[in-house]
Amino acid sequence: MPKLIPVADESSKPFWDAVNAKRLLLQHCGACNKLQYPPQATCQKCNKGDQLTWKEVQGKGHIAAAITIEDGRLNRRMADMPYNLAMVTLDEDPSVNFYANLPGTPPYKVPVGAAVEVTFEEVAPGQLIHEWRVV
């Protein structure tokens, strides 16, 4: 399945640098003790930007919901239909969600509620992305 090659901006560069080192690093707000993804200039909860730091997380979660895309409109994904789209909640903070295709899980076979862990996939020379796999 074709993957987008990420283009880091000022807010996301530390995240993508960590992914390229096979680590999952999320922003953490010291003002309200909230983890957040995707990276942003300010906290999604309290809107403060001066207390955002980076925190490494274990990269474990659970599948909260899933659908199978049968009739998408993205030209680059047409050949891959049907494919999974799952919402993964992070165990360390269930308010943090990731969306994933769950490589290795066949369409229509997503085990909602199952444990997942982060994995890393090369999408271009020297560029990794984070994915989630059922464990």
Image (cartoon, rainbow, N blue to C red):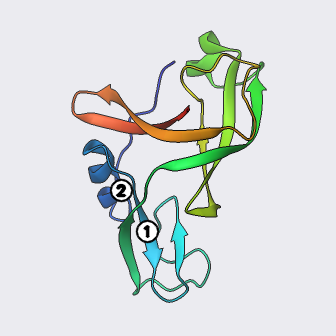
Mark 2 or mark 1, which has the lower sequence index? 2
Q: Indicate the position of residue 21 as horizontal and vertical percent values.
A: 25, 45
Type of residue at label 2?
A: Phe
Q: Which mark is residue 37?
A: none
Look at 62% across and 40% down and name the residue there.
115
Q: Please name the residue shown 53% across and 66% down the image.
A: 36
Residue 41 visible in this rendered orientation of the protein: no
Q: Secondary structure at mark 2?
A: helix
Residue at 59%, 74% (x, y): give it.
44
Q: Amino acid at mark 1?
A: Gln
**Residue 122 figure quarter:** top left
In the image, residue 27 above or below residue 127: below
Q: Left or right: where does residue 47 sit relative to residue 113?
A: left
| Residue drawn where x is 27% and y is 51% of the image | 17
| Residue situated in front as seen by the camera: 20 or 9 | 20
Q: CA distance from mark 2 to mark 1?
A: 8 Å
| Quarter where residue 67 is shown | top right
> Which residue is the extreme one toward the top?
79
The answer to whether the residue labelled 2 contacts the one labelled 1, judged by CB atoms less than 8 Å apart, is: yes
Horizontal side, residue 119 vs residue 46: left or right: left
Q: How many marks?
A: 2
- Foreground of the two, 109 or 5: 109
State left or right for residue 96 relative to residue 71. left
Circle 1 — which element?
A: strand
Q: Which mark is residue 15?
A: 2
Q: Position of residue 88 (x, y in %)?
A: 63, 46
Q: Position of residue 105 (x, y in %)?
A: 62, 21
Q: Quadrant of residue 27?
A: bottom left
- Residue labelled with disc 1: 27
